[in-house]
Amino acid sequence: MVNISVTALLEQMTLDEKIAQLMQITPNFLTDNKADLTGPMEWMGLTEENVANVGSVLSSVGAGKVIELQKNYMANNRLGIPLLFMADIIHGYRTIFPVTLAIGCSWDMELAERSAAIAAKESAVAGIHVTFAPMVDLVRDPRWGRVMESTGEDPYLNSEFARAFVRGFQGENLSSDTDRLAACVKHFAAYGAAEGGRDYNTVNMSERQLRESYLPAYKAALEEGCEMVMTAFNVVDGVPATGNKWLMRKLLREEWGFEGMLISDWGAVHEMIPHGAAEGGEQAARKAIQAGVDMEMMSSCYVNNLKQLVESGEIDEALIDESVLRVLLLKEKLGLFENPYRGADEQREKEVILCDEHRRAAREIAAKSSVLLKNEQVLPLHPGQRIALIGPFAQSGDILGPWSIWGSREEAVQLFEGISEKTAPARISVAQGCNIETGTEEQLAEALQAAQSAEVIVLALGERSEMSGEAGSRADIRLPQVQLDLIARLKQFGKPIAVVLFNGRPLDLHGVIDQADAVLEAWYPGTEGGGAIADVLFGDVNPSGRLTMSFPHSVGQIPVYYNNYNTGRPLKAENADQRYVSKYLDIPNAPLLPFGYGLSYTTFTYGKAKLSADVLQPGGQLTVTVEVANDGKRAGEEVVQLYMRDLVGEVVRPLKELKAFEKISLKPGEGKSVTFTLQEERLRYYHSDLSYESDAGDFQVFVGPNSRDVETLAFRLLK
Ligand code: GLC
C-alpha cells in the first residue's frame, strides 16, 4: 500500500523534476562556484535546473556540511523534496574495522553485525542516510583487487554475513532509529567473477552456475530487508547488468519480489555505450529505465534523454513514475520529509565518532579476524624477549584498506605502538628494512643492525592498500621481491622469524611461509590494527580466524576454491603418477592453504563423528554429532565445520559444500559435543532445468576444523 502523500507529491512533479530526481551526483555540483563547475557541468550536460532537482548526493559527509547542503538544496527545490545522502561505508566510517574479507575470517555473525551497527551510528550522525554496502560478491580469484571487500568463496557463509551486515546497518526500525543506515547490497550480479581477475572484465557463466553460487548472498541480503540494490559494471550473459531486463525485472523484481530502489554503479548506465550495448546515451537511458534502474549514479543519460524518449512515445512516463516513487518512498521511510537532517548532529558527532567503545570493538574484531597460518613454537611472544620489529608495516598507518575513505591513517594504531604497549621500549628495536616495492642499502643495513641483538624477529610485510581494492588487480600475487629478499637475508641470522601480513587478498606465500617460523595474516586490520595484532602476537588474544578464501599454491592455479567439481579424471593418490589425469606438470592441484583453515595457540582434538541414522527419510532430519576437546594449555575458539557431498546428481555436484558451522570456546581440558542438524532442504540444488530440488541417493558429510582435514560419514536420502 503506497503512502498517499508520496503519490500526491509525485503528481505535483513536472517531468523535468521527476527525471532529475533519478540522478545522483557528487556534492561539488551543488557547492562549487559556477565558474569551477563549467567543465563538469558541460561534460555531464547538466543544467542548473537539473542540479537543483537531483534526487541524491554521494560522498558528502560531516554533519555540518550535510546540514548546510540539505538546507540550501531544500530552499531551491520547488516542492521541498529532500536529498538522499549516500556513501561507501563498507567496514567503518571513521572507526575503521578490518576489511570485509578479514571480518569474514572471524566466522562470527555477531561481530559482523556489531561492526556494521557502529559504522552506521558514526556515519548517520555525520549525515549519511544510505551506505553502499554490504558487498556480497562471491570471489574465487585473488588477482581481483576487490576480494578484500567480500567475505569469500562460499555461497552459504557469504549469505550469513550478508544478513548480519544488513541487520547491523539497518537495525530493527530504520524509520525511527536515526542511528542506522539503509543498506545497498552490491554488485548485482556476479561482479566477482571477472575473467582473469581483471576489474570490470567480462563475466561469463550459465544461469545455473549464477543461481548456484553467485546469487544466494544477494538474495539473503534482500530477505533480511536490505532497502537497495546496486547494479554491477559487468555483463550477465552478454547483457550489461545495468540494462539487463531479465536480471533486474524478471529475477530481482518478479521472482524475488524486490520492491526497493535500484541504483546503477558509478557511470554504469553510460558504460553501456563502450560495452557495445547502446549506440548512445538515449539507448542507454532507455535500456536502463526499462530494466528498472531507478537512479543513475554519476552519468547523465537519464537527464539528457528520458524527456524526449517520453515525448517521442518510445517509453511510457509510467516507467519514470515507478522509479521516482521508489526514490520518494525510501526518503519517506527514512523520515526525511519530516526531518531532512535525520541523524546529522554536529555536537553528537564529536561524542560518537572514534569513541573509546568503538575503538575497543574495532580492536576486538581485528584480533578475531586475523588468521594464524603457521606457528612453529615462535608465537605467542613474551614481554621479556628482545624483539626486532622490521618491515614496511612496522610503523605504518596504511592498515585501513582501500575502502576507508573517511578513516585516517594518522588515527590508526601502528604495529610498533601496539607492541610497545606490551613490552619495554628497550626490548624492541625497529627498522623499516625496505619500502613496499623498493629498498635501499641503508634500510637493509638498519634492519640487519636491529636483528643483530634480537632474540626474535617480527617482520611486518604486505601490500600498499592501493594494490588491492577497486581497479587494484594484480597478475603476480606474491609479496614484492624486495620484501622476499628481506626475509631471505634475515633468515641468515638463524633466529626465529614471525611474519605479520598486511594485505587485501590471498597471496602466493612462496618465499614467506617456507622461510618464516610463524605467519599471522592480519589483512588490513583497521584503526586499532596495531593494538589488535599485538594482542594476538603476545597471546592476550588466542587467534581464531579461519580462511574464507583459499590461498593458491601459485597464481597459475587460479581459480582454486574448495567447492569445485571432481571432473571425469580426478587426480588421486593412486593415479598421481599417471599422465592423463586432471593435474599440472609443475604444481599440485590443492591450494597452499584451504578454505576454513586457521591455527590456534592451543590444540583441538575431534572425537569420532556420529550420524543419528544412515538414512534420511522425506521430511525427516539427521543429526551429526562430534566431540571437540581443547587439549592444550590455553583457552581458545574453534570453528567446527560441516560439509556435504551429493555423490551423484542430475548435474555434477561439488566435492564439498559448507552446510553448517559453529564457533565454540573451550577452556584448557574442556570438551563440547557439537551437533548439526541436516534436513532434506539443505540437499537441494539447481537442476539443468533450473528446478531446485534434491534427489534420492548417496551423500557424504564431512566434519572437521577446515575443508581439508575432515572425517567422512555417509548416509542415503530416500524419496
Ligand atoms: C564505485 C564502486 C562501488 C561504489 C561506487 C560509489 O565505482 O564500484 O562499489 O559504491 O562507485 O563510490
Image: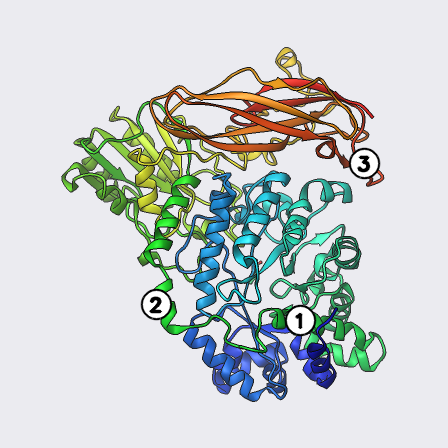
Tag 3: Cα neighbours inside 10 Å, few (<14), some, or many (≥20)?
Answer: some
Q: Which residue is mark 3?
A: 687
Q: Quadrant of ligand 1?
A: bottom right
Left or right: 283 with respect to 145? right
- From the viewer's perspective, tell me whether residue 461 is left or right of residue 675: left
Q: Would residue 583 be visible to someone looking at this image? A: no
Residue 329 circle label: 1
Q: Please name the residue that numbered disc 2 is placed on.
A: 350
What amino acid is found at the position of numbered circle 3 in the picture?
Answer: His
Of labels 3 and 2, earlier in sequence is 2
Answer above or below: position of 22 versus 652.
below
Q: CA distance from mark 2 to mark 1?
A: 31 Å
Q: Quadrant of residue 354?
A: bottom left
Q: Position of residue 40 (x, y in %)?
A: 55, 78
| Mark found first going from the N terminus, 1 or 3 | 1
The correct choice, above or below, for 8 with respect to 645 in the image is below
Q: Secondary structure at mark 1?
A: helix
Q: Amino acid at mark 1?
A: Leu
